[in-house]
Image (tube, grey):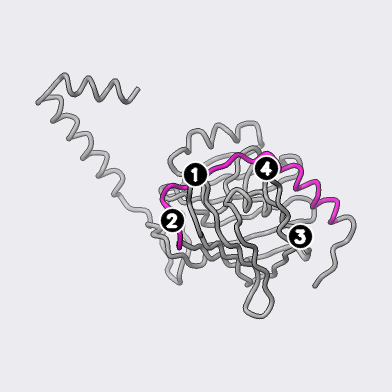
């Protein structure tokens, strides 16, 4: 194993403290047995301590990866908005596995978020408005990209993504691409001090739909349905409007 210098220990400790108040977020579209496998594009030559977020701030152990290694998150439970799983680092010959890791812990331990927001591998795709509000004043620009090209499972497709780009937020530089409809992290680069990690989704058992015109068609269908309701029953339409407020 590579040795961790005192300077890196200090930076890692500060990184842990800096990210200690990440808020919990989960994606309602995942379930036990789902998994995500990421290819390591690049990584700093460091051994890193993995701490879970506070509370309880669990220490899981040390980990390190190099280019072409894998980082795999295997979901074991989803309960009360908290996603838990098993986290694997490395390859067949040299690897580390941590158990009972929450998605919010992956945001905390790997730097996959922007304080106070914890994205991790799974952002809450039903709450983008609040997520965007939480990263205001963090030197972060957020862009919706309707056609982002990425190769997953050997096939290149275009995906609708939400892109977070953070520049020097207390020393953090990050770039996160989240699938808009599912909230799955598709690609990420993050760095803080001497720590650096870049990963890209390699394969998953979740359905991650490429960009299509389907959302627009569904919107038109819903609009026509509401119009029909208004013709049939004005009181029913009024009730729907009150519920939507």
Q: Nearer the viewer, mark 3 or mark 1?
A: 1
Q: Bin the neighbour count of mark 1 within 10 Å (Cα to Cα): few under 14, some 14-19, many 20 and up.
A: few
Mark earlier in primary sequence (1, 2): 2
Q: Which residues are magenta?
A: 8-33
Residue at 25% from the left image edge and 25% from the top image edge: 240
Of callouts 4 and 3, the N-terminal one: 3
The circle drawn on residue 55 is 4
Residue drawn at (75%, 40%) of the image: 170
Q: Mark 4 touching mark 1, by CB under 8 A?
A: no
- Distance in Å between CA atoms under marks 1 and 2: 11 Å
Q: Which residue is mark 1?
A: 81
Q: Secondary structure at mark 4?
A: loop
- Determine if the magenta segment contains residue 15: yes
Q: Quadrant of the N terminus?
A: bottom right
Q: Is residue 62 magenta?
A: no
Residue at mark 3: 48
């Amino acid at each position: 194993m590579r040795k961790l210098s005192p300077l890196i220990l200090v930076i890692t400790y500060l990184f842990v403290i800096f990210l200690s108040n990440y808020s919990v977020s989960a994606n309602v579209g995942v379930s036990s047995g789902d998994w995500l496998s990421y290819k390591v594009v690049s990584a700093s030559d460091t051994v890193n301590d993995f701490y879970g977020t506070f509370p309880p701030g669990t220490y899981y152990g040390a980990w390190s990866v190099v280019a072409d290694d894998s980082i795999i998150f295997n979901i074991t439970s989803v309960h009360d908005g908290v996603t838990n799983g098993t986290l694997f680092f490395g390859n067949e010959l040299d690897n580390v596995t941590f158990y009972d890791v929450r998605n919010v812990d992956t945001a905390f331990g790997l730097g996959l978020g922007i304080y106070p927001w914890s994205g991790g591998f799974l952002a809450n795709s039903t709450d983008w408005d609040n997520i965007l509000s939480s990263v205001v004043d963090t030197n972060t620009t957020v862009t919706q990209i309707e056609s982002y090209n990425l190769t997953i499972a050997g096939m290149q497709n275009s995906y609708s993504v939400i892109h977070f780009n953070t520049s020097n937020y207390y020393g953090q530089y990050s770039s996160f691409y989240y699938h808009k409809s599912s909230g799955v992290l598709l690609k990420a680069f993050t760095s803080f001090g001497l720590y650096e990690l870049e990963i890209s989704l390699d394969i998953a058992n979740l359905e991650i739909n490429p960009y299509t015109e389907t959302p627009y068609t569904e919107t038109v269908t819903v609009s026509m349905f509401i119009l029909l309701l208004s013709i049939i029953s004005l009181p029913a339409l009024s009730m729907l409007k009150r519920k939507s407020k």
